[in-house]
Amino acid sequence: MFSQRSRYAHAATFETTDLAGRRVRAVVVPSPPRELAIGRHVRREGERLDLLANLYLKDPTGYWRIAALNGAVLPDSLAGVDILFIPASGRAPMI
């Protein structure tokens, strides 16, 4: 259902009924991985999290790891943050 690189790759799923009465499959949001920061990045104008994830993690889909390490549930909430902690490269540890 999800790419093996996705944070949802091994997440549990369940079925529920939506407001229109349809049966739908939903994903349980996994807890963020416990990661250590390898350093900080001072953002320049126009630097998006996916670009930083590609630069530091070699994986543009890993933007959510930067968001989680910086305490953001929604990556867009970091839009005004000038200094970001950067997680170690490689796959996020699963907990």
Image: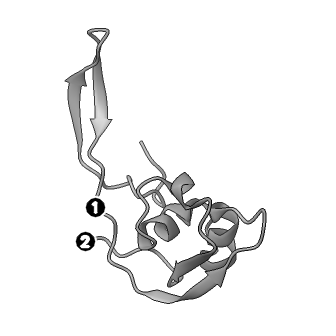
Instruction: Give yes or no for contact between labels 2 and 1 (Cβ–Cβ under 8 Å).
Output: yes
Residue 3 position, x and y percent, is 49, 52
Q: Which mark is residue 95?
A: 2
Place residue 36 in its image quadrant: bottom left
Q: Relative to 20, is 44 above or below?
A: below
Along the polypeptide, which appears first: circle 2 or circle 1? 1
- Residue at left offset 69%, top offset 76%: 55
What quarter of the picture does the N terminus occupy? top left
Secondary structure beneath label 1: loop
Q: How is the image coloured?
A: one colour
Residue 92 horizontal/vertical position (percent) = 42, 74
Amino acid carrying mark 2 in the image: Ile
Given this view, does label 2 or label 1 mark the residue nearer the observer? 1
* Residue type of the residue flagged with mark 1: Ser
* Picture quarter with the C terminus: bottom left
Q: Mark 1 points at which residue?
A: 31
**Where residue 89 appears, x then y in whole percent?**
54, 82
